[in-house]
Amino acid sequence: MRVINTSKLLTLILVLIAAVFFLLAAPGALYAQNNGNGGNGDSGDKKPAPLESSDIEAIVNLMIKEYYDPLDAKTLTEGFVKGVDDYTKRKKIENPVAGLTASENLKQFSGIFADKIKAKGISQKDMQAYMYAGIRGMLKTFNNNECRFYRPGRYRQTLQESGYTEGGCGFFVDEKNKDTQSRWMVIETLQDLPADKQGIQSGDRLIAVNGKSVKELEFRQLTKEVRGPVGSKVILTIYRPALNKEIKVTVVRTFLGPNPKSLRYKILPGNIGYIKFRYLGERMNTSLEEIQDEFARKKVKKVIWDMRNSAGTMTGALDLAAGFAKENEVFAERLFKTGSESFKGTGDKDALKIKPDAVIMNRYTSASCAFVALVLDKYHKIPIIGQKMIWDGDDTKSYHLRDDSYFTMPYAYYKFNGGKLLKNGVVIEPTIAVEQIPLPPYQGGDKQLNKAAGN
């Protein structure tokens, strides 16, 4: 198995972000490849080969070894059985492994599966669909949104075969929920990228791509439609609620790097500085210092950080947050199955110049932004205004199988200073709750922003 350790990037982003970090090897059907930062994941001389029933044991053991919470073979094999059963019911076909039961004995379980497949005259090639269904079933037992399975071709198509020539538009949507009319909701655009330049806005609804309706598509299918060769054109049909009309926008796809520009700022009435975080990436301090210097020259009274509808990386969050924490004090830990990694504050005096007077958060605030808000609240009593968000900042890896299929699975989560565990599904509450719809246009005005401004 090839195990690829990837920085947690918000998977909602409809982009190709080819920053992949490669780590350790695992046995059996699993192989490792270390191509370094930005590697394309090519397995070298290894050619894809169909999965075998004996691979079930290696995959289960790998899941138990790597996932940060306790797992057991019986629960996972129960998931495998259910996954195959659900697949055959959905396809309205006979279940060839009916009667297969979960077991702690993985060799026995794999052997019975193989015997049942053989008894039905199913070839190794045709067996793959049942293996995939079983793997998906096992991943569902984790009850974690980061656990996903991808059939062969997904990885090579987006990285190796594309040769990094695939581009995107630079916007991200809610990948889990559509609106009441099955339209994809645009959460935000990335600064100075094609979608932003062509006027696509937070709150727009995506209806069609190149004239093809996307209402019935799954998220992965949507990304395939939106992405394409760098320099190629794509026509996006959007509905804009503020205008109550559909608009067609032609966008030229571009390469989207791993650390896009993020900050948009202005001075609001009342001489209040306002900074909107679209993406919290690395080395944010310099940009924030430049903005704060301009605010200081114009003698703004207070500064608001709007972290709603954002994306970002935990690497960027830890870097920014370190300056706000006390020097040499552990403000967070990353916890693995075994062991941990500590992050200490720098007590950077320059960081005090850029800290805001209030932070706004909502359900679409990224885990990276929510983390920085928590640090600001703990060390500087900066109020967090808005709505609760559900943490989705676990660190994940991609585990590549012998046939070039792969699955993703979290391998680490965070613990905040004070003991609060930050793992997928944990609720992060604001210090001052102000409810309103998460995406513009805001009926009756932006209540959260008004509260932060002191209105």
Image (cartoon, grey):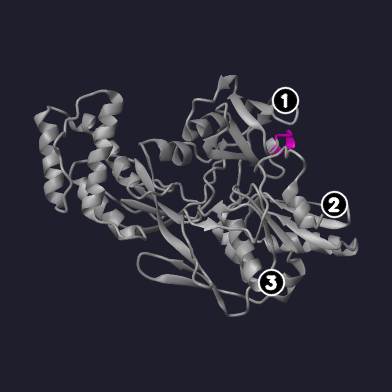
* Residue carrying label 1: 244
- Amino acid under label 3? His
Q: Which residues are magenta?
A: 196-200
Quadrant hosting residue 296: bottom right
Q: Secondary structure at mark 3?
A: helix
State the image coordinates of residue 185 (x, y, percent, origin top left): 60, 35
State the image coordinates of residue 218 (x, y, percent, origin top left): 47, 31
- Residue 343 vertical position relative to residue 117 in the rendered view, above or below: below
Query: How far apart are labels 3 and 1 at the CA level?
Result: 43 Å
Q: Is residue 314 magenta?
A: no
Asked if residue 232 can be seen in this view, the reply is no
Q: Is residue 197 magenta?
A: yes
- Amino acid under label 1? Asn
Main secondary-structure element of the magenta-colored stretch = loop
Q: Relative to the observer, which residue lies in front, 296 or 435?
A: 435
Q: Residue furthest top?
A: 211
* Residue carrying label 2: 268
